[in-house]
Amino acid sequence: NVRSAYTDSVDFFGLNTPMELVEEFGSTLYVYNENMLRRRCREIKALSSHPGFTPNYSAKANTNIHLLKIIREEGMVVDAMSPGEIVMNLAAGFTPDQILFISNNVSAEEMQFAIDHGVNVSVDSLSQLDLFGEINPGGKVVVRFNPGIGAGHHQKVVTGGKETKFGVDPASMDEVRAILARHSLTLCGVNMHIGSLFMQPEGYVAAMQVLLSIAEQWVAPAGSSATGTDNGLEIIDFGGGFGIPYRKYDGESRLDLDALGTAFHAAITEFSDRTGYKGRFMCEPGRYIVAECGLLLGTCYSVKNNGTKRFVGTDLGFNTLVRPAMYDSFHDVEIYREDGEPVAETMVQSIVGNICESGDIIAKDRALPEIKEGDIIGMLDAGAYGYVMSSPYNQRLRPAEVLIGSDGRPRLIRRRESIDDLLRMYPEAEEFAARFR
Ligand code: LLP
């Protein structure tokens, strides 16, 4: 291989080479590593030994049912953003009480869907709280608050703070109480999410204190003797956003989980000791759990020099991994070649896809060993927000997904999309299938 030091160091591909995997399952291909997935789950579970600590995986990052099953086996619970995610979680064997529907601007039907399946609902605005009360009077509900603190790798993924659409302003607590009372609702939880991808724990820990002070108003309302879960509060959920180092070849350091865990544990322990709260404390990482266990393989079909620029033409269009085009995100690149020797000498190249847009660049102006036609290219850390954000744009087929098991063997966990799939939603589906199969 020309450049594979990272995947070699973690034994990512198990018994097969990337060339063999592409040969067997085709290109483009998402490849996941089971050992790595389990390791990340265990790291998050080790964040705190508090008996109420309940680590939650944020399923939006990757909803492949087979990965969800492993995450469930590792003892995590899960959230959902939509009825579709609720179904994926149920299909993976999560029970309704292990799922939290973190809704955002949803219809009454979508809320009803969650309620019918016995899933707790978190609402994101006063009007949605009111809607919940109308369709489920006397029910239990979680309210998402905006702690006024945001974080994230890009403005598009910061979800806390006044500039964002998320959460109820803690200043409207009187209205929250009034709506709850009007529909005889029980507030069974409070949650927040400040944004996606922080590498320093401070902002998260500061926001935890904001949510805890909100929770405290419900655990032991002023002038009352109620403590613990007497008044129904069962969930305090601090959200996700835990970052991972995308610059593997630059030796970027990891998020200091020990420091975060120490602060997390201290905050929740202090809170439960002081207030008598007996419910769950949750954190909700998505990316941290699945990003690094996943990698996207593609193939170089053509190389050209346009003036001074070298373009490496591949099937890795933004239909397969949209993060670079959407957020200018950086994913490190590996290069695999039969009998290829590691190459130290680099040249500046841009890896582009096969989509009809000039923004279809998955790795821009990178100093990499010379890539040639026939090389297999690996985009690292593509397990989170990779497949789930892929699309059939240009009527290209979504990649297949393969899991390298703990025994090192690959297993197909979702087949490649097919032309039939693209035609299936038309009234003439049968006729088309007969003509184009
Ligand atoms: N909880 C809530 C309510 C969220 O909205 C999110 C992510 C998470 C948890 C998990 O965040 P994580 O731990 O994965 O950072 N597509 C973007 C990321 C969008 C995140 C959206 N919400 C990306 O590719 O970077």
Image (tube, rainbow, N blue to C red):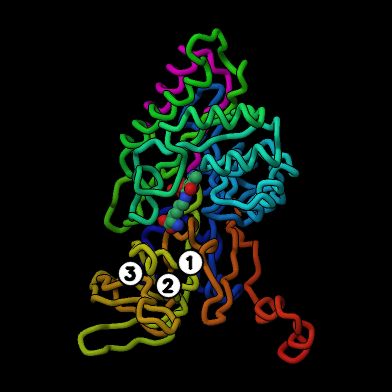
- The quadrant of the rendering that contains the C terminus is bottom right
> Is 62 on the left-hand or right-hand side of 1?
right
* Residues in magenta, as a range: 258-287
Residue 240, quarter of the rendered image? top left
Q: Is residue 285 visible?
A: yes
Indicate the amino acid at tag 3.
Pro
Question: In terms of sequence position, does the residue under pointer 2 or pointer 3 come before the other?
Answer: 3
Label 3: state its secondary structure.
loop
The residue that appears at 25% across and 71% down in the rendered structure is 367
Label 2: state its secondary structure.
strand
Mark 3, residue position: 342
Q: Is residue 374 visible?
A: no
Q: Is mark 3 within 8 Å of ligand 1?
A: no
- The quadrant of the rendering that contains the N terminus is bottom left
Mark 1, residue position: 296
Residue 121, quarter of the rendered image? top right
Question: In terms of sequence position, does the residue under pointer 1 or pointer 3 come before the other?
Answer: 1
x, y (%) of residue 211?
A: 43, 29
